[in-house]
Image: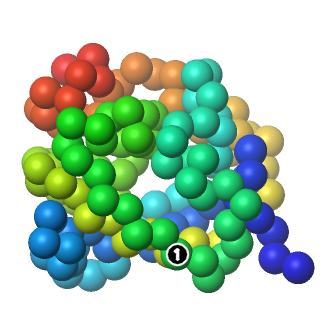
Amino acid sequence: MSMQVDHLKKVRLRLEAGSESGSSDLTPEPRKMTFICGTASGGMCPFEYQLIGKTAGERLELTIPASRLAETMAHLLRPLRLALEITAMPAVLALAVAIEEVSEPAPLEIIRAMAEAANGDGCGGDCDCGCGGH
């Protein structure tokens, strides 16, 4: 039986992003994002909750308005922006998410992820998203 996404599991995702039209116009090639679920001091974000219980091979199709992006992604917004290699998010982000792998992280990885989630660095862009990191 495959490991499920859960609190403190390491998750590797394949991402394809597009704008409101739903096409993959923002990422012509799929991008990767790896994180440890549930490491933020405020608990899991809505994005993480949508992944809970899923296993490698499962997919999600999300449509996130820019006004809800910071709330939906929370501490994962900066890693998402870095993974997608985009600085300006569209008015509506169409995000195709495929779970590639779920594994047990090393204790040091958990500590590092908790520190990164707590650093208050914001989303990493000049976005007016309300993240407070600018």
The image quadrant that residue 63 belongs to is bottom left
Quadrant (top left/top right/bottom left/bottom right) for the C terminus? top left
111 relative position to 106: left or right: left
Q: Amino acid at mark 1?
A: Arg
**Up/down of 22 relative to 128, above or below:** below
Q: Position of residue 44 (x, y in %)?
A: 60, 36
**Residue drawn at point x = 23 percent, y = 57 percent:** 93
Residue bearing mark 1: 59
Left or right, 103 with respect to 73, comes to right
* Residue 51 in picture, x, y percent from top left: 60, 58
Identify which residue is drawn at 53% across, 37% down.
Answer: 45
Residue positioned 30% across, 41% down in the render:
69
Is residue 80 shown left or right of residue 18? right
Residue nearer the viewer, 125 or 95: 95
- Residue 15 seen in the current view: no
Q: Is there any visible trace of residue 51 in the rendered image?
A: yes
Q: Can you give x and y, in whole percent of width and height, for residue 125 in the image? A: 18, 36
How packed is label 1: few (under 14 Cα within 10 Å), some, or many (20 or more)?
Answer: some
Q: Secondary structure at mark 1?
A: strand
Q: Position of residue 6 (x, y in %)?
A: 74, 52
Quarter holding residue 19:
bottom left
- Count of labels shown? 1
Note whether 116 is above or below 77 in the view shown: above
Which quadrant of the view contains residue 100?
bottom right
On-image quarter of the N terminus:
bottom right
The residue that appears at 39% across and 47% down in the rendered structure is 79
Reply above or below: 34 against 41.
Answer: below
